[in-house]
DNA sequence: TATTGTTATACTCTATAACTATA
DNA sequence: TATAGTTATAGAGTATAACAATA
């Protein structure tokens, strides 16, 4: 993603101070991004990189990555669903979902139970440890979400969610 | 990506017809995404997947991927900049930028010229073929951008760009 | 010494094909 | 024959370390 896993927040990049108008003594020549700065696809990518960066910083403390977070929350909210149902809901291929669940199971956060009426499928549940962790993750994600949206305010946040849903569903 | 390169738009996924309110006879139990549907990071990801999917569909005809598109446009707008300057502006590591430029050069779209006053660095330029292609790409991206933002309207589009810039810069 | 471009390398994410066990 | 889960595998994206040429 466009994003990556290894989080090295070392070199805090120097941002421009004067955001209003071209500064008299500009440091760098400033590259013109042209149409990229007016196209949703590119700005989505840059925004997502920034947000995921903050996410990694926040959640590296509990060693949870975005995909793991999403799976844990969805199992917590929908216990007993079949593996493929959850994978589909999250837009993850069931083939890639296997090792993801393996990891959660190995850490004692989730578990597979063979479904009652279909012995092919596994129903997913959180362990007590998993439930406890999710409670913590919910608090963490709220802080994270507020931090990355500081600049756009509450009303901007509300608008952004609505607009993004429109883009995501607009196929 | 969150996104990928191989574009298989085969199975057109069945979308719900009744978008207004819960249908009386629902097909699937509908998984509750819980907080994911209220958090910017997750919705950014879903929106980006949708947009990039459309991008791949559109630009596979000319065999151009997002990163290539961005590089071509920026060279076109800023001819003669050094390799690393362009890489930095696009948030691409210079080490990964090498093969990207290699590809454009091999296709005869761009070229490296050793900089006049610093023989370590390569200045980048588009060839005539490259300039011709970029003109076409600009027309294509406009149509693409309009298509993926159909649902949110012109005002929504304007708002979204502004909000995304706020998120991307808000570090 | 520092910087530019480069190579080699590693890890994550996403994708397809093919297997197995059940239905 | 079809489906759920799985394994193996491949490609793109992104990261670091180390090198040569040049400043």
Image (cartoon, coloured by chain):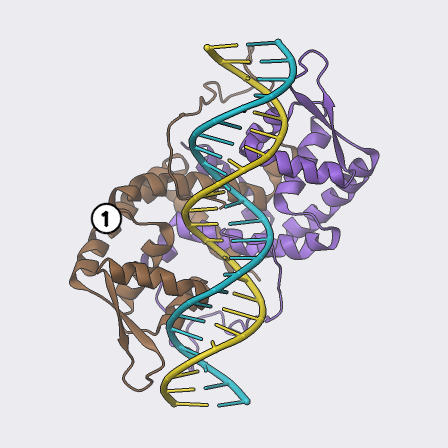
Chain colours: A brown, B purple, C yellow, D cyan
Q: Position of residue A31 (x, y in %)?
A: 61, 25
Assign the C terminus of chain B to one quadrant of the image.
top left
Q: Position of residue A48 (x, y in %)?
A: 46, 44
> Foreground residue, A65 or B153?
A65
Q: Which residue is tagged 1?
A: A139
Query: In the shown orientation, is residue A71 left or right of residue A131?
Result: right
> In this rendering, is residue A36 above or below C15?
above
> Foreground residue, A15 or A101?
A101
Q: Is residue B145 visible?
A: yes
| Residue that appears at 76% across and 41% down | B107
> In this rendering, is residue B15 above or below A101?
below
- Secondary structure beneath label 1: helix
Q: Where is residue B28 in the image (x, y as percent from the top left)?
A: 42, 77
Graded by Cα atoms within 10 Å as few (under 14), some (14 to 19) or many (20 or more), the crowding at tag 1 reads few
Query: In the shown orientation, is residue A105 left or right of residue B73?
Result: left
| Residue that appears at 75% across and 30% down | B111
Q: Where is residue B12 in the image (x, y as percent from the top left)?
A: 59, 70
> In this rendering, is residue B87 above or below B7?
above
Query: In the shown orientation, is residue B99 left or right of residue A1?
Result: right
Q: Mark 1 lies on which chain?
A: A
């Amino acid at each position: 993603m466009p994003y990556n896993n290894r989080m090295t927040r070392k070199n805090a990049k120097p941002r421009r101070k004067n955001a209003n108008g071209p500064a008299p003594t500009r440091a760098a020549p400033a590259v013109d991004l042209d149409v990229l700065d007016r196209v949703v696809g590119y700005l989505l990518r840059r925004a997502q990189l920034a947000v995921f960066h903050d996410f990694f910083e926040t959640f590296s403390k509990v060693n949870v990555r975005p995909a793991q977070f999403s799976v844990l929350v969805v199992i917590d909210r929908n216990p007993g669903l079949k593996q493929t149902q959850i994978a589909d809901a999250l837009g993850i291929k069931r083939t890639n979902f296997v090792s993801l669940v393996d990891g959660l199971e190995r850490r004692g956060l989730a578990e597979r139970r063979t479904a009652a009426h279909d012995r092919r499928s596994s129903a997913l549940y959180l362990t007590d440890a998993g439930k406890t962790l999710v409670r913590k993750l919910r608090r963490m994600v709220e802080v994270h979400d507020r931090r990355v949206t500081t600049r756009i305010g509450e009303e901007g946040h509300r608008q952004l969610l609505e607009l993004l849903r429109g883009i995501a569903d607009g196929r």
